[in-house]
Image (cartoon, rainbow, N blue to C red):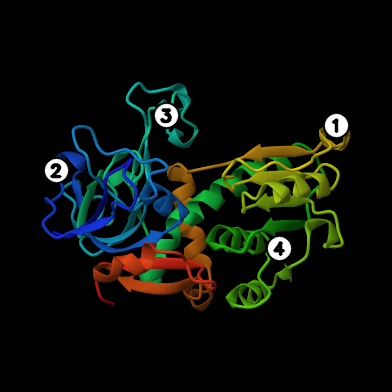
Amino acid sequence: MRALTVTPGTTDSLRLDQDFPEPDPREGALLVEAVAVGVCGTDREIIAADYGEAPPGGDRLVLGHESLGRVVEDPTGRLKWGDLVAGIVRHPDPVPCPNCAAGQWDMCRNGQYTEHGIKGLDGFARDRWRIEPEHAVKLDQSLGLLGVLLEPTSVVAKAWELIDRFVERDPWQPENVLVTGAGPIGLLAALLGTQRGLDVHVLDLATDGPKPQLTHDLGATYHSVPVHEIGFAPDLVLECTGAAPVVFSVMDAVGPCGIVCLTGVSSGGHQIPVDAGALNRALVLENNVVFGSVNANARHWKAGADALASADRKWLARLITRRVPVAEFAQAYGPPDADDIKVVVEFTDH
């Protein structure tokens, strides 16, 4: 079968293997036929040899952690043939740490977790893959290809769950949210914000292309100005760029008792002048919360599936800006186009 593989630690080693072995039954009882995988910055970083880890005993890693497939067989009977599913990316460590033992492997304490297509487990960019049924999330059949958006949606579902917990600390209820970055994570975060009935604002540098209209069609407000020029102090912020100047700007801009969730991962190596004392004073005196969030556990994946099922299909479809056949994979993993939001690699025709 076909599989997109890399040699971790070797730059630009991505290739399409035509005779990759069928998935070992030890990978899981559930056999799934791949429909598509999403492409994200993590994949490009692994291709660039920034990180990535092959399964034990191997030197190649199957890429792909944003999955979509259809069930071929499930001997446990939990799922049936043809069900549309996505595979949960992270698996708990074998020790396990207290969080992993409680099913919160997204909060692993000792770093011994594994992740499909990233760390110690082959990914989903292959014609067929296996996983344990409890690590497969069933999607609404009507989503079709749009189900490939579940992994990034699970990430923002976790972020919103954590925000909701912090909101519970006092009687005041937030009315608005600022989302910085209009990539797939940012737009999906905005979607979940509108589903909560909040006044949603999205900030991004793009002034043309699909992002402003996608934001408008959510019923949200689009900004392409610096954070300090948006004209209000947001109650909530979801920072989805990882750009250091934006990170510090939103921490400074959030209103009293406000909450800032950082989901973007900074590249590092950038120095900017920051009045740390003034920032600390503001955060403390205004009872603000700043926290980071990454990955997701089964609860968040299911919440993400519910959010997609409730979303407008035509709007979701516009997030997928390029569909690339697996045979032309190099086009998908090369430098993104200016108007790209989500690129997917297709294994089957629709």
Real-space CA distance between mark 4 and mark 3, rounded to the nearest whole angstrom: 35 Å
Binning the other alpha carbons within 10 Å of mark 1 as few (below 14), some (14 to 19) or many (20 upward) gives few
Mark identifier at residue 277 = 1
- The CA span between labels 3 and 2 is 24 Å
Q: Residue at position x 72%, y 49% from top?
A: 245
Identified by mark 2, the residue type is: Pro
- In the rendered image, the quadrant that contains the C terminus is bottom left
The disc, 4 or 3, on the residue closer to the chain's N-terminal end is: 3
- Closest to the observer: 203 or 206? 206
Q: Amino acid at mark 3?
A: Cys
- Decide which of tag 4 and tag 1 comes sooner along the chain: 4
> Is residue 168 in view?
no
Q: Earlier in the sequence, mark 1 or mark 2?
A: 2
Report the mark closest to the observer, 4 or 2: 4
Please tell me whether mark 4 or mark 3 is closer to you in this view.
4
Describe the element under mark 1 as helix, strand or loop. helix
Residue 25, label in figure: 2
Where disc 4 sits, the SS reads strand
Crowding around mark 4 (Cα neighbors within 10 Å: few <14, some 14 to 19, many 20+) is many
Q: CA distance from mark 4 to mark 2?
A: 46 Å
The mark lying in front, picked from 1 and 2, is: 1
Q: Are marks 4 and 3 in contact (CB under 8 Å)?
A: no
Where does label 3 land, which residue? 100
Give the amino acid at mark 4. Leu
Q: Are marks 1 and 3 in contact (CB under 8 Å)?
A: no
Q: Are marks 1 and 2 in contact (CB under 8 Å)?
A: no
Sequence-wise first label, 1 or 3 = 3
The mark total stands at 4
Q: Is residue 294 visible?
A: yes
Residue beneath disc 4: 203
50 sits to left or right of 22: right
Type of the residue with mark 1: Gly
